[in-house]
Amino acid sequence: MVCALLLRHPQARKEVIVPQDLAGECFVSRPCVLGSRRIDAIFVCYGIECKVQVETQMSWSICAFVEEGLWVALIDPITAIEYKSGVSASARSTRC
């Protein structure tokens, strides 16, 4: 997974973003039935509340929400590479 952020987001300049960097952030995510359980487990492991505001099935729509500056997201690396507009992505994964 990679972290998708608006280019002007304070964390966007970091090469590595760890779960603690995202504490207090609001997220757009995939529905639980489509694999977001892994993301939830990472945050639970670090004792961080994942405040999901919206769920959507499409990775492109997740990036569009991020680009509008509404939320941050954890997305697949392929979408992060292909979606080049106003979204920054840190391509480091974190394991619990």
Image: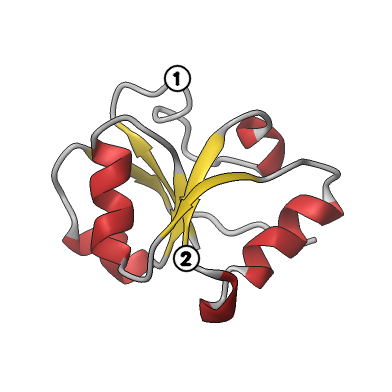
From where the camera sits, is residue 95 visible? no
Residue drawn at the location 65% of the way across and 42% of the way down? 18
Q: Which amino acid type corresponds to the residue marked 1 in the rendered image?
A: Pro
Image height check: is 11 above or below 47? Answer: above
* Residue 30, label in figure: 2
- Do the residues bearing badges 1 and 2 touch, measured as CB atoms within 8 Å? no
Image height check: is 62 above or below 87? Answer: below
Q: Which amino acid type corresponds to the residue marked 2 in the rendered image?
A: Arg
* Secondary structure state at the residue bearing disc 1: loop
From where the camera sits, is residue 26 visible? yes
Residue drawn at the location 36% of the way across and 32% of the way down? 70
Count neighbours of disc 1 (C-alpha within 10 A) and say few if under 14, some if 14 to 19, many if 20 or more: few
Camera-nearest residue between 48 and 18: 48
Viewer-nearest of discs 1 and 2: 2
Q: CA distance from mark 1 to mark 2?
A: 24 Å
Residue drawn at the location 44% of the way across and 40% of the way down? 72
Q: Which badge, 1 or 2, comes first in the chain's sequence?
A: 1
The residue wearing badge 1 is: 10
